[in-house]
Image (spheres, rainbow, N blue to C red):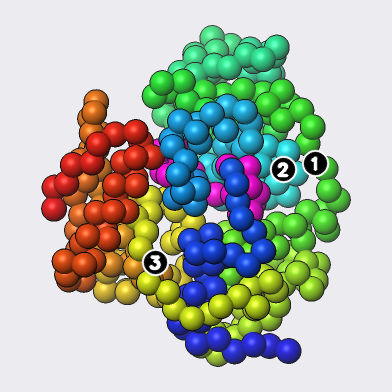
Amino acid sequence: MTVRLNRAEALALRMTGLLLRPHPTTRPRGVADVVEWFGAMQAQDAASGLWSLGVRLPGATQDDVRAALERREALRTWPMRGTVHLVPARDARWMLELTGVRTLVGIAGRWRQLGLTVADGERACDVLGAALTGGGRLTRARCVAALRAAGLDTGDQRGYHLLLFTSLRGVTCIAPHVGTEQTFALLDEWAPEPHRPERDEALALLAHRFVRGHGPVSRHELARWTGLTVTDATRAITLAGDLLAPVEVDGEPAVVDTALLDAPRAPVDDLHTLPGFDEYLLGFKDRSLMLDPAHAAAVVPGNNGVFRSTVVRGGRVVGTWTRTLGARAVTVKVQQLVPFDAALRARVDAALTAYARFLSLELRHSW
């Protein structure tokens, strides 16, 4: 039976699935739990990825999250859409094999423009495979230098594309930063005991994780998020079986995590200060549940894919914020998209204080 949801109920379930309010069946206790819940969390900006985890792990600090990543509870790679995500370490290989291949198809035209060939990519795999063997970990700059020393042209974004290729092939992955520098390691050494599901099992697993972390969503949103075809996305939802339940939002078909149908669907007045590249907005084409279309340009200036950090009240974006890091303090400037009364401003202050505590810094305001 299809359950009909009004927009307020759909928004409440979406907040619950995104772990921004208590979920009836899960209590994430650490980085591994949160990342596995989502399956993948967009993290092309490393600092944003850290806070996406921190905001869902109240009381954790940035150092706690970094330590968990050093313990390999999750890693960063390019599993889909040519975009860096945090994924469970043991799931990285099957995700690359399921969705990463479509990224290779998608960048073929750009490779022709750059004069790159598959042979160049395979050569890069050999070079970095040898350079990183034995637990090695090289900065991005040193990886590019190794490719250049092997005779590969790394100019005009070729270095980036070769690094992308080696990760899509499952040779390398992105290890945690050393200082401010991105580093790379061998995937086989960073995740030596990979889960290897068959394709149908992998499709079902990916669909379930996406839907439980983002629902209610449509099959088209699953296809968009994963880079799979709509046909594969539809099949993935079918394969997930009773784990997913059909719903209808504004007359449009969607699916949710079945466990959520027993969760309270009343609107709540939660207040969150989310990073720019957070799944709460990035996982969807239609963001009208969370974001007034009139405010879209303030969140994504120029519609160029770069998202500002947001202030979210009751699931709706009510402001944006920017930060400036100092040695002892983080200075935050808030832009109000709706009027803030004194009570709301106090709640925003409290949320930003929690963010500063996550960074182990003092908070300074610049309203």
Residue 195 has which mark? 1
Marks 3 and 1, the one that precedes in the sequence: 1
Give the answer, above or below, for where 267 lies relative to 50: below
Which numbered disc, 2 or 3, marks the residue closer to the eye?
3
Marks 1 and 2, the one that precedes in the sequence: 2
Q: Residue at x 60, y 75 (%)?
A: 263
**Under tag 2, what secondary structure?**
helix
Left or right: 109, with 228 as reference point: left
**Under tag 3, what secondary structure?**
loop
Residue 51 has which mark? none
Residue 270 has which mark? 3
Q: Which class describes the residues within 10 Å of circle 1: few (<14), some (14-19), or many (20+)? A: some
Q: Residue at x 29, y 47 (%)?
A: 353
Q: Badges 1 and 2: C-beta atoms under 8 Å apart?
A: yes
Kind of residue sitting beneath label 2: Asp
**x and y percentages locating residue 201 in the rendered image:** 82, 56
Q: Which residue is mark 2?
A: 91
Kind of residue sitting beneath label 3: Asp
Left or right: 15, with 117 as reference point: left
Q: What segment carries the magenta color?
A: 31-51
Q: Which corner quadrant of the image does residue 196 belong to?
A: top right
Kind of residue sitting beneath label 1: His
